[in-house]
Image: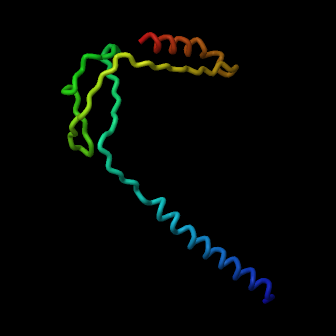
Amino acid sequence: MPISSVYTRMSRNRLLLAIVLLSAPVVYLAQQTLKVDVDLVNVFVTVQGNGGEFVSDLRRDDFVLYDDDQPQKIDIFEKDSDVHSAIGVLLDISGSMVDIIPYMNRGVKATSAT
């Protein structure tokens, strides 16, 4: 067996061993779970009635908040009736969609009417 073949095989084995040894800590760290303790978590809620209208006269007592199946105390409850939002709708109007563009337009108009 030529010396260069033995050297190449040993070099490959050493390289493979080095990769395995160096990647083991990375795999271990990737399996770790980050756990932190926090004193306050913000939960934002928008409530709509059966007809799609926004319900704005809710109080703290109207909500129950759970964490790991345990009810939690709601420390701060604030209402904001002046919430600004924007929605963008993108429609594919390429040649392959030409037959269904009227349906898409009706769907967008119906959705925006609620």
Percent x, y of residue 113? 44, 10
Percent x, y of residue 20? 58, 71
User: Taking 17 as reference, is 78 left or right?
Assistant: left
- Measured along the vertical axis of the image, is residue 79 above or below residue 67? above
Q: Could you say which quadrant of the image residue 44 lies in?
A: top left
- Measured along the vertical axis of the image, is residue 61 above or below residue 41? above
Residue name at image x 29 percent, y 25 percent: 78
Residue name at image x 32 percent, y 46 percent: 38
User: Taking 14 as reference, is 37 left or right?
Assistant: left
Q: Nearer the viewer, residue 1 or 31?
A: 31
Type of colouring: rainbow
Q: Report the quarter where the C terminus lies.
A: top left
Percent x, y of residue 75? 24, 34
User: Taking 6 as reference, is 90 left or right?
Assistant: left
Residue name at image x 45 percent, y 60 percent: 31
Q: Report the quarter where the N terminus lies.
A: bottom right
- Measured along the vertical axis of the image, is residue 14 above or below residue 97? below
Percent x, y of residue 59? 22, 23
Residue name at image x 30 percent, y 22 percent: 79
Number of numbered labels in the structure image? 0
- Measured along the vertical axis of the image, is residue 22 above or below residue 94? below
